[in-house]
Image (spheres, grey):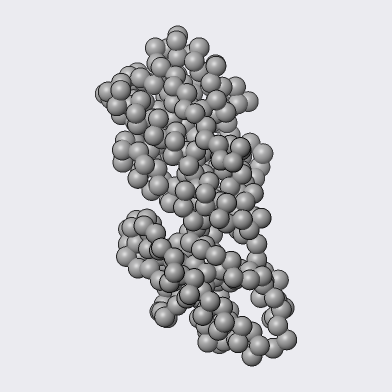
């Protein structure tokens, strides 16, 4: 897939079928939209195009983005796996915020052969979210493109959405979130220096930092899988089973919430690497222990339990 910065970079010599959205998490509902986009593009002899935004529009519209389900780089890689066409990363700023749906479509289609726009009945874009499906259908009749409705996807009577996936992650319902996403929940972060307390306890950790606020499950200890290395996030050169500690280190009176990753059977310098961690199962809640020795004993039990869980489960396509 070709990556373009801004819709103005779209070629004028191609027939285009386009869908527009944030697509945070690239969940199963998004995947269905992409499937409709690809089918529509084939039917009309067009190039499929996905337009997404940086930053999340709510960061500009309401002053704060929701805690994200997915890092931007990973989001773009997932889209490229699912759509064999172009992805446009459109800057969302105060100027773009004031763009009406009519202005957006004129800018998107101006001088181009726009064949189709694919959207769901809950999709909106443009100033005041005025670009609804009925509005775009009418605009398409005047502008000469086809407006194609992609059906939304329900699970257990509720529509699959990024907001619902966030709710499940925050509630610790990781299996439910995985059903919406179509894969285990994962986060991508940068390995940074920490206090090296894990190494002092005999369990060295990689401490992850995130460029944007991310959606985190409840504090606790998790069996996980970690991947890193290579040019593509979803095609890593290295992988390892892991145990995640998420919380404030209550045994040591900590106050800062940290995500620390202990890699099983691997101890090497990973500072500066981008690491993706996949949450497989929560082992227990975080707890304050009376001594470091008592914590070390519990960490040994956590590692042993995680080994059993991870050995018995399928590592999935990204391991």
Where's residue 39, x and y in %?
34, 28
Where is 264 relative to 104, above or below?
below
Q: Nearer the viewer, residue 318 or 85?
A: 318
The number of numbered discs placed on residues in the rendered structure image is 0
Looking at the image, the residue that sits furthest to the top is: 142
Question: Looking at the image, can residue 304 be seen?
Answer: yes
Residue 247 appears in view: no
Q: Residue at x 27, y 23 (%)?
A: 45
Q: Is residue 154 found left or right of 271 in the rendered image?
A: right
Between 65 and 95, the residue placed more toward the observer is 65
Task: Assign the C terminus to one quadrant of the image.
Answer: bottom left
Task: Give x and y (percent) for residue 285.
Answer: 66, 70
* Quadrant, the N terminus: top left
Identify whether 208 is placed above or below 263: above
Q: Point out residue 2 in the picture as x, y percentages from the top left corner.
A: 31, 40
Seen at 33% across and 26% down, the residue is: 41
Q: Residue furthest bottom?
A: 293
Q: Is 3 on the left-hand or right-hand side of 181?
A: left
- Residue drawn at the location 51% of the way across and 56% of the way down: 185
Above/below status of 225 relative to 89: below
Residue 146: horizontal and vertical position, in percent?
Answer: 41, 17
Is 288 placed left or right of 262 in the picture?
right
Is residue 288 positioned above or below 238 on the image? below
Residue drawn where x is 44% and y is 33% of the image:
33
């Amino acid at each position: 897939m070709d990556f373009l910065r801004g819709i103005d970079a779209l070629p004028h010599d191609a027939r285009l079928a386009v869908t527009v959205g944030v697509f945070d998490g690239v969940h199963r509902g998004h995947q269905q939209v992409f499937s409709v986009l690809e089918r529509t593009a084939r039917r009309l002899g067009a190039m499929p195009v996905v337009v997404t935004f940086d930053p999340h529009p709510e960061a500009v519209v309401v002053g704060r983005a929701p805690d994200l389900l997915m890092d931007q780089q990973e989001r773009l890689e997932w889209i490229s796996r699912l759509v064999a066409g172009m992805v446009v990363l459109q800057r969302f700023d105060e100027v773009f915020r004031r763009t009406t749906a009519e202005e957006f479509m004129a800018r998107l289609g101006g001088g181009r052969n726009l064949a189709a726009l694919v959207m769901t009945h809950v999709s909106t874009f443009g100033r005041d979210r005025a670009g609804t499906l009925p509005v775009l259908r009418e605009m398409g009749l005047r502008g000469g493109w086809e407006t194609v409705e992609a059906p939304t996807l329900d699970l257990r009577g509720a529509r699959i959405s990024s907001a619902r996936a966030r709710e499940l992650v925050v509630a610790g319902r990781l299996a439910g979130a995985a059903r919406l996403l179509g894969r285990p929940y994962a986060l991508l972060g940068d390995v940074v220096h920490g206090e090296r307390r894990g190494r002092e306890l005999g369990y060295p950790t990689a401490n992850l930092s995130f460029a944007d606020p991310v959606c985190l499950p409840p504090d606790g200890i998790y069996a996980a899988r970690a991947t890193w290395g290579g040019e593509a996030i979803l095609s890593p050169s290295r992988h390892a089973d892991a145990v995640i500690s998420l919380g404030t280190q209550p045994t040591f009176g900590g106050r800062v919430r940290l995500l620390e990753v202990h890699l099983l059977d691997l101890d090497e310098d990973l500072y500066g690497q981008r690491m993706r961690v996949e949450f497989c199962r929560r082992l227990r809640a975080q707890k304050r222990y009376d001594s470091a020795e008592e914590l070390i004993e519990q960490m040994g039990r956590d590692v042993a339990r995680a080994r059993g869980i991870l050995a018995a489960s399928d590592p999935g396509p990204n391991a």
